[in-house]
């Protein structure tokens, strides 16, 4: 066990932004708030056979990459906001660590090394978060209302008075929101407010467990007029979300490089960082390089974030998504942008996709894959099965661009594509979608190589293979 007076030398940083050291017994110690190159005295919390988790008590030999956090609510102390984990680390170092996490996952989980590491996609590090779920708590004993993220490692809501990763206009709204909720009759039955900002609209979705009184509705209207906010109400599940008052500007974001406008509802999945998303879509399509004569499939197409830009370049684009509702919304967005002639959408459970399904969807010259955190294991396995057990008429896509929000599942799927399905990983790179957090987004490019030897699907290449990743 680490001793109270034992100075630990921090060697690296893990995916959760904890410093990694070894004590005198050789046991790994994860230290919140410590950075590589520093020496630290710690207070050990959790203890396991092979590792300990500790908090920082005292530092010497501070890292040159340590910076002063930009937000007064960031810290390791009780009550500190848990929305960010890396504000004490220089922004460039944050990106370098995320790139290393991607490389390590590819190498260790997928047994894959990209031929080229792409320059990370970066953007604004403050005021970038255009989507957020803020918890609301009326604390009767203190006669106050809290609106914000949870405290670090706690179910309690942080006493946030400002937030530097939210847009300035939203950060400035936190204290007025607290006053608004405190004045409402339903203050005890309002558990959360969800932020969704478009290019020209700031929308707030109020979750309410009981019907709102006429007086509370009027309070919301007054607040909306004063702070230029579009209120949406959510009495039950996400499907019940509706505008408080019809009319007003459309909630949408644009992809100007492709002349596409993407309308969305505030509870739809869209990227939190529109600036990064714009760059991400542009780079993904340049790497995919669709030609006017080609057919492309966009797997996990969502609302059409990649499908519609692809439709401006390719002969035909098929968007596939797991939900009939999302498919209907994608069709609406295609019509909104005049892109119905060469787009088609289908609903299919992509976590149960089979080689038969791929045969039925037909040949596509190229694929764009953008799955949720669970990854695209079934899709990669079906492609690998068609390589190991060929079928008449099957021609694999020549290029795949895989956009990922989880480097572990990307690495798992890349292992199948490269080691079984006959692809080369020609490029990969990190995407800093969530600055100051430990979240890693990334992108990888695969090209089919018919000369690569066919390997059997190994037992280790299972859907659970990425779950044990750090």
Image (cartoon, helix red, strand yellow):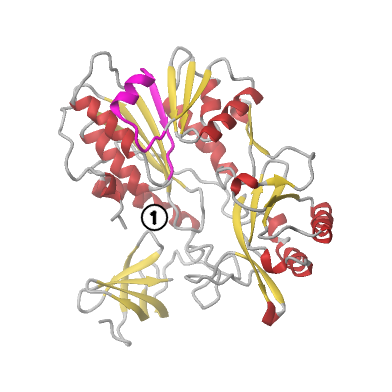
Rendered-image quadrant of the C terminus = bottom left
Q: Can you say whether 190 is above or below 117 in the image?
A: below
Q: Can you say whether 412 is above or below 318 in the image?
A: below
Q: Is residue 398 visible?
A: no
The answer to whether residue 352 is magenta is yes
* Residue displayed at 40% across by 62% down: 16
* Residue displayed at 22% across by 79% down: 24
For the residue pair 63 and 105, the one nearer the viewer reads as 105
In the drawing, does residue 386 fall left or right of residue 74? left
The answer to whether residue 98 is magenta is no
* Residue displayed at 40% across by 52% down: 98
The boundaries of the magenta stretch are 349-372
Q: Residues within 10 Å of mark 1 (few under 14, many from 20)?
A: some
Q: Residue 209 at x, y = what percent?
A: 66, 60
Q: Residue 385 at x, y = what percent?
A: 23, 29
Q: Residue 17 at x, y = what percent?
A: 41, 63
Q: Residue furthest bottom?
A: 5
Q: Which residue is mark 1?
A: 97
Q: Dot 1: what SS?
A: helix
Rendered-image quadrant of the N terminus = bottom left
For the residue pair 369 and 183, the one nearer the viewer reads as 183
Image quadrant in which you'd find residue 312? top right
């Amino acid at each position: 066990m680490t001793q109270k007076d034992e100075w630990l030398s921090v060697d690296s940083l893990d995916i959760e932004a904890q410093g990694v050291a070894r004590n005198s017994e050789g046991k790994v110690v994860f230290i919140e708030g410590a950075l590589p190159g520093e020496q630290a005295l710690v207070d050990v919390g959790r203890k396991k056979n092979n590792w300990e988790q500790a908090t920082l008590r005292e530092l010497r030999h501070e890292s040159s990459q340590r910076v002063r956090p930009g937000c007064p609510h960031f810290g390791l102390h009780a009550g500190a906001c848990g929305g960010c984990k890396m504000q004490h680390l220089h922004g460039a170092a944050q990106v370098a660590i995320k790139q290393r996490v991607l490389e390590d996952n590819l190498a260790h989980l997928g047994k894959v090394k990209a031929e080229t590491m792409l320059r990370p996609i970066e953007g604004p590090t403050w005021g970038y978060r255009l989507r957020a779920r803020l918890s609301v708590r009326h604390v009767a004993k203190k006669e106050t209302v809290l609106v914000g993220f949870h405290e670090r490692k706690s179910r309690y809501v942080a006493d946030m008075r400002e937030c530097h990763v939210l847009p300035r206009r939203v950060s400035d709204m936190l204290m007025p929101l607290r006053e608004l909720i405190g004045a409402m009759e339903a203050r005890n039955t309002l558990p959360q407010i969800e932020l969704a900002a478009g290019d020209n609209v700031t929308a707030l979705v109020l979750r309410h467990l009981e019907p709102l009184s006429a007086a509370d509705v009027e309070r919301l209207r007054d607040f909306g007029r004063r702070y230029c906010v579009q209120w949406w109400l959510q009495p039950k599940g996400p499907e019940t979300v509706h505008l408080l008052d019809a009319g007003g500007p459309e909630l949408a974001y644009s992809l100007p490089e492709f002349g596409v406008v993407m309308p969305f509802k505030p509870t739809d999945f869209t990227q939190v960082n529109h600036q990064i998303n714009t760059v991400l879509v542009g780079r993904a399509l340049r790497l995919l390089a669709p030609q006017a004569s080609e057919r492309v499939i966009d797997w996990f197409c969502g609302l059409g974030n990649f499908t519609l830009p692809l439709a401006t370049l390719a002969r035909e684009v098929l968007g596939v998504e797991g939900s009939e509702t999302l498919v209907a919304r994608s069709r609406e967005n295609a019509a909104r942008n005049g892109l119905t002639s060469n787009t088609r959408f289908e609903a299919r459970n992509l976590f149960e996709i089979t080689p038969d399904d791929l045969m039925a969807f037909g040949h596509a010259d190229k694929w764009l894959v953008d799955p949720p955190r669970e990854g695209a294991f079934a899709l990669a396995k079906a492609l690998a099965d068609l390589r190991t057990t060929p079928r008449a008429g099957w021609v694999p896509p020549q290029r795949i661009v895989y956009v990922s929000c989880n480097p572990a599942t990307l690495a798992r799927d890349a292992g199948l594509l490269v080691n079984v399905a006959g692809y080369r990983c020609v490029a990969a790179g990190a995407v800093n979608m969530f600055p100051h957090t430990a979240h890693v987004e990334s992108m990888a490019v695969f090209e089919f190589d018919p000369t690569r030897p066919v390997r059997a699907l190994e037992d280790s290449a299972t859907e659970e293979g990425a779950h044990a990743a750090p």
